[in-house]
Image (cartoon, helix red, strand yellow):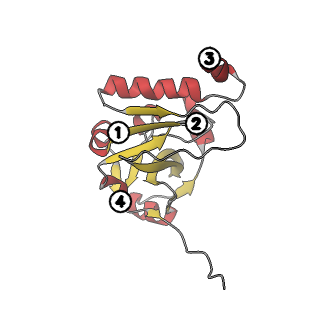
Amino acid sequence: TAVARRLRRPGRMSGPMIDSVVHYLHEAGIPFRLTSYPAPEPEPRVAYRPIPTAQLVETHVVLVDGQPALACTLCGDYASLAALSTETGGVVEESDAEDLSGEYHGASGPIPPLGGLVGVPLFVDSRVAELTNVAFRAFGPNDYLEISYDDLALVEHPRIASFGEAGALPPHQP
């Protein structure tokens, strides 16, 4: 089928990876909604309608005292390393999927906020913890999962802290 051919293309690792996310959530008994926008051509990029019932979040890989961890913020925010350092009492550094282990070592695409799946602790920004539903991409640009934040917290037991920052506003343009 066309889907099977798309998943077999070199450099397209999201297929098997998304399967692991679905299996992980099924095993945990967590209800979720998977929305996929298959795009057979890499260009032109197509804008997809955001999931109207959830807030999009993103995950950052960090090192806490040399050990990998995930930090979940609102989409577009970045994880303040200084705030996470204060929260953990350790040294926090920016990282990437190269520091993850097993099949997730060097994974391409967005990492889902599922520390239990990846085998690392999860930190969640306090603004994310206030949401009813969250949506996130998992290992690819076109696959979105939506779950309630309460279910995410139930399975992940994240550490909640205020570390998400939107950054500075751009300079005023006359």
Element type at mark 1 = strand
**Residue 64 against residue 23 in the figure, above or below:** below
Task: Quote the CA–CA distance across marks 4 and 2.
Answer: 24 Å
Q: Mark yes or no: residue 115 visible.
A: yes
Task: Quote the CA–CA distance across marks 4 and 1.
Answer: 16 Å
Element type at mark 3 = helix
Q: Earlier in the sequence, mark 4 or mark 1?
A: 4
x, y percent for residue 29? 29, 26
Q: Earlier in the sequence, mark 3 or mark 2?
A: 3
x, y percent for residue 163? 43, 62
Residue nearest the viewer, comparing 54 with 48: 48
Task: Quote the CA–CA distance across marks 2 and 1.
Answer: 17 Å
User: Viewed as shown, does residue 94 lie left or right of 162?
Assistant: right
Kindly check if marks 4 and 3 are in contact, taking CB atoms under 8 A apart as contact: no
Please tell me the numbered disc located at residue 127: 4
Name the residue beneath numbered marker 2.
140
Please tell me the numbered disc located at residue 147: 1
Residue nearest the viewer, comparing 96 with 37: 37
> Disc 1 marks which amino acid?
Ile
> Disc 3 marks which amino acid?
Ala
Closer to the camera: disc 3 or disc 2?
Answer: 3
Element type at mark 2 = loop
Task: Quote the CA–CA distance across marks 3 and 2.
Answer: 16 Å
Residue nearest the viewer, comparing 52 with 109: 52
Please tell me the numbered disc located at residue 4: 3
Q: Earlier in the sequence, mark 1 or mark 3?
A: 3
Task: Quote the CA–CA distance across marks 1 and 3.
Answer: 26 Å
Kindly check if marks 3 and 2 are in contact, taking CB atoms under 8 A apart as contact: no
- Mark 1 crowd level (few <14, some 14–19, many ≥20, 10 Å Cα): many
Kindly check if marks 1 and 3 are in contact, taking CB atoms under 8 A apart as contact: no
